[in-house]
Image (cartoon, rainbow, N blue to C red):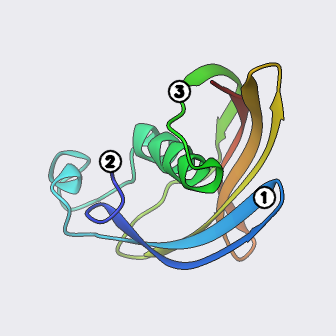
Amino acid sequence: MLAGSFYRVTTQSQEPGQVTVTIELNAEHPIFGGHFPDQPVVPGVCMMQTITEVLESAVQQKVTLKKAGQMKFLNMIDPVKQPLVDVTVTYKEEEGGWKVNATLKRDDKIFMKFQGIFN
């Protein structure tokens, strides 16, 4: 779990089928020592884990990624230069899983887009 150490949620809004949070990244987290020293970049796996955690919070259950239909990393996130990131997750329950669309962005800069299914 990355919440609380890698990032913290600063704001959250939720409506049926959608949750939006603003996270503040911890540029001092040990992950950045290896990814990469003196040029920190948020790893893609951490972006995906953040989406998973935001979804779990919204649906109040543990979920597992079943299928990643689309996962696009469009810009790198430097936690020093870009400590705040907006995460929007839209979700719909269907056939025993959750159909999810998500974005990580800040203002007009999109870092990641995701479409997939969680169980």
Q: Amino acid at mark 3?
A: Thr
Does 57 sit left or right of 105 as displayed?
A: left
Q: Residue at x 72, y 25 (%)?
A: 97
Q: Quadrant of the C terminus?
A: top right
Residue assigned mark 1: 18
Labels in figure, total: 3
Measured Cα–Cα span from mark 3 to mark 2:
13 Å
Q: Which mark is residue 61?
A: none
Residue assigned mark 3: 64
- Please tell me which residue lies in front, 102 or 90: 90
Farthest residue to the bottom: give it: 10
Query: In the picture, residue 29 is in which quadrant?
Result: bottom left
Q: Residue at x 17, y 45 (%)?
A: 34
Label 1 element class:
strand
Q: Which mark is residue 1?
A: 2
Q: Are the residues tagged 1 and 3 within 8 Å (C-beta)?
A: no
Give the mark nearer the N terminus: 1 vs 3.
1
Q: Amino acid at mark 1?
A: Gln
Measured Cα–Cα span from mark 2 to mark 1:
21 Å
